[in-house]
Image (spheres, helix red, strand yellow):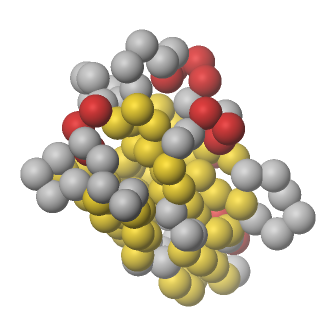
């Protein structure tokens, strides 16, 4: 059974930091690109960050560049999102996701959630002003 289990969400003041984790099981982790998405109330889901399985290339949406860092530990089948300098606009439910990469054009399509195969249940991040 495939599982992606997020942890690390919570309430933090603006300017603070949080580290999200996603523990994966049930699939061959190092064959999959992994990503973080988020959805704020009343807004569409958006891709936040992604890391390639082939060469560990990383991608970020513009609004988090320089503040968020995605990483992974293939030995532990876990990936992370370090979030620094958090802003109230970062408030959302954060979801981790996995996609069997193969020849998938990650660089151009990673932000489109419909391509991703597996999803976590989500973890709430709330940033107070």
**Residue 24 quadrant:** bottom left
- Quarter of the N terminus within the rendering: bottom left
Q: Is residue 91 above or below residue 69?
A: below
**Residue 5 quadrant:** bottom left
Q: Going by the image, does 32 lie left or right of 124? A: left
Q: Is residue 54 above or below residue 70?
A: above
The residue sitting at 51% across, 15% down in the picture is: 105
**Residue 110 quadrant:** top right
Q: Going by the image, does 129 lie left or right of 109? A: right
The residue sitting at 64% across, 69% down in the picture is: 93
Q: Nearer the viewer, residue 29 or 27?
A: 27
Q: Is residue 8 above or below residue 84?
A: below
- Quarter of the C terminus within the rendering: bottom right
In percent of width and height, residue 125 lies at 58, 75
Q: Nearer the viewer, residue 67 or 43?
A: 43
Residue at the limit of the structure toward the right, as seen here: 42
The residue sitting at 15% across, 58% down in the picture is: 76
In percent of width and height, residue 27 lies at 30, 47
């Amino acid at each position: 059974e495939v599982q992606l289990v997020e942890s690390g969400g919570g309430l933090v003041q603006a300017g603070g930091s949080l580290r999200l984790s996603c523990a994966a099981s049930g699939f061959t982790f190092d064959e999959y690109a992994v990503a973080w998405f988020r959805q704020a109330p009343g807004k569409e889901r958006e891709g936040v960050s992604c890391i390639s399985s082939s060469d560990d290339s990383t991608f970020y949406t513009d609004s988090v560049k320089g503040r968020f860092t995605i990483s992974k530990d293939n030995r532990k089948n876990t990936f992370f999102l370090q979030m620094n300098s958090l802003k109230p606009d970062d408030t959302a439910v954060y979801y981790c996701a996995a996609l069997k990469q193969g020849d998938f054009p990650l660089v151009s399509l990673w932000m489109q959630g419909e391509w991703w195969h597996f999803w976590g249940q989500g973890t709430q991040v709330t940033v107070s002003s």
